[in-house]
Amino acid sequence: MWTRTNAAPSRQPNSAFVVLIDAPTHSEVLLEPMNFSLGDFSVLLHEKPELSEVIECEIDVLNKVSEGCRMTVVRVEEFRAGQVPHIVHLKSPLPCDSLPVFEHFRPSGGIG
């Protein structure tokens, strides 16, 4: 698990981001998800993963970390034709809103 005190500078959480993804097997830096919704999101990766590949990661929502998440690659697109990075679409095998880290996104209160 990474924390503010033991992380390398490139993996430091930035309080400006609400959600960060730590997928050390696929990125040397923390990832900021795009098109984020409960259960799926997209990230930019330099190396193209295989479809159906499972990526183990930690998800940090407002500095609450959910460890041991397993996201499945459901689609890979080129960001720009013939260039890296790749837009990688990931999906959780279980409803992400069931994870404690996503309590901020439940309909009862929204973010905050």
Image (cartoon, grey):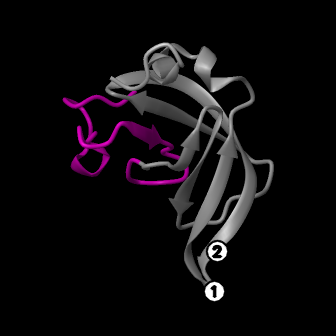
* Residue farthest along the front direction in this orientation: 108
Q: Secondary structure at mark 2?
A: strand
Name the quadrant of the N terminus: top left
In space, the residues marked 2 and 1 are separated at their CA atoms by: 7 Å
| Residue 83 placement: quadrant | bottom right
Label ID, residue 78: 2
Counting from the top left corner in percent of width and height, residue 57 is at 54, 36
Horizontal placement of 64 versus 39: left or right? left
- Residue at 47 percent across and 54 percent down: it is 27
Instruction: Tell me whether circle 2 and circle 1 mark residues in contact (CB < 8 Å).
Output: yes
| Three-letter amino acid code of the residue under disc 2 | Glu
- Residue at 79 percent across and 55 percent down: it is 51
The front one of 32 and 52 is 32
Horizontal placement of 43 versus 81: left or right? left
Label ID, residue 17: none
| Three-letter amino acid code of the residue under disc 1 | Gly
* Residue farthest along the bottom direction in this orientation: 82
- Residue at 47 percent across and 19 percent down: it is 101
Q: Which residue is mark 1?
A: 82
| Chain part drawn in magenta | 1-30
Q: Secondary structure at mark 1?
A: loop
Image height of 65 relative to 79, above or below: above
Counting from the top left corner in percent of width and height, residue 90 is at 66, 46
Counting from the top left corner in percent of width and height, residue 70 is at 65, 32
